[in-house]
Image: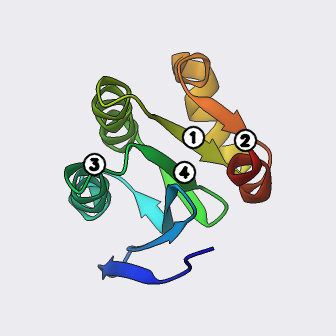
């Protein structure tokens, strides 16, 4: 598998790493995803889609917080990925982040996996 790092972006509250694993782009946000940090996730997701990678796996295991702005970034990426014949898979969500998806019903529109390995095996 290709494990080359595509890139990373960072602010004081959010670090985003991107790498490729097989046919998937694995995007790993670490920290707090909110109004102030949303572009740090939006840009690498759009970059992956722009380069033709339509299967995005977001490893949420290091995501400590997600507000409605962060949720909207993921929803927008999902629409673009599905339009390109792919999708956005969420993996390893911590309970505090999973709760945001449950309350809003967004968990019903994403493919959610317990672990990153499970998301990559699909």
Q: Please tell me which residue lies in front, 42 or 119.
A: 119
How far apart are the two marked residues, 2 and 4, measured between alpha carbons? 11 Å
Whether tag 3 and tag 1 are in contact, CB under 8 A, the answer is: no
Which residue lies under the disc numbered 4?
57
Residue plotted at (67% across, 49% down) = 91
Whether tag 4 and tag 1 are in contact, CB under 8 A, the answer is: yes
Residue plotted at (38% across, 32% down) = 78
Which residue lies under the disc numbered 1?
89
Q: Earlier in the sequence, mark 4 or mark 3?
A: 3
Residue 77: % across, % down = 32, 38
Whether tag 2 and tag 1 are in contact, CB under 8 A, the answer is: yes
Q: Please tell me which residue lies in front, 38 or 54.
A: 54
Q: Earlier in the sequence, mark 2 or mark 3?
A: 3
User: Looking at the image, is 26 positioned above or below residue 52?
Assistant: below
Looking at the rendered image, the disc whose residue lies closer to the viewer, 3 or 1, is 3
Looking at the rendered image, the disc whose residue lies closer to the viewer, 2 or 4, is 2
Q: Please tell me which residue lies in front, 111 or 3.
A: 3
How far apart are the two marked residues, 2 and 1, measured between alpha carbons? 10 Å
Q: Earlier in the sequence, mark 3 or mark 1?
A: 3
Q: Secondary structure at mark 4?
A: strand
Residue 95 figure quarter? top right
How far apart are the two marked residues, 3 and 1, measured between alpha carbons? 14 Å
User: Looking at the image, is 58 positioned above or below residue 79?
Assistant: below
Residue 70: % across, % down = 36, 44
Q: Residues within 10 Å of mark 3 (few under 14, many from 20)?
A: some
Q: Please tell me which residue lies in front, 110 or 63.
A: 110
Query: Quick one: quadrant of the C terminus?
Result: top right
Numbered label attached to residue 49? 3
User: Looking at the image, is 10 positioned above or below residue 88?
Assistant: below
* In the displayed structure image, the side of residue 11 where residue 43 appears, left or right: left
How far apart are the two marked residues, 2 and 3, measured between alpha carbons? 19 Å
Which residue lies under the disc numbered 2?
122
């Amino acid at each position: 598998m290709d494990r080359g790092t595509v890139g990373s972006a960072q602010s004081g509250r959010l670090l985003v790493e991107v790498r490729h694993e097989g046919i998937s782009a694995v995007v790993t946000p670490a920290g707090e995803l909110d109004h102030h940090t949303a572009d740090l996730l939006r840009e690498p997701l759009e970059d992956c889609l722009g380069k033709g990678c339509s299967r995005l796996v977001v490893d949420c295991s290091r995501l400590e917080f997600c507000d409605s702005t962060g949720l909207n970034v993921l929803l927008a990426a999902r629409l673009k990925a599905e339009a390109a014949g792919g999708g956005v898979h969420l993996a390893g969500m911590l309970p505090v982040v999973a709760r945001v998806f449950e309350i809003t019903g967004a968990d019903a529109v994403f493919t959610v996996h317990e672990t990153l390995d499970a998301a990559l095996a699909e």
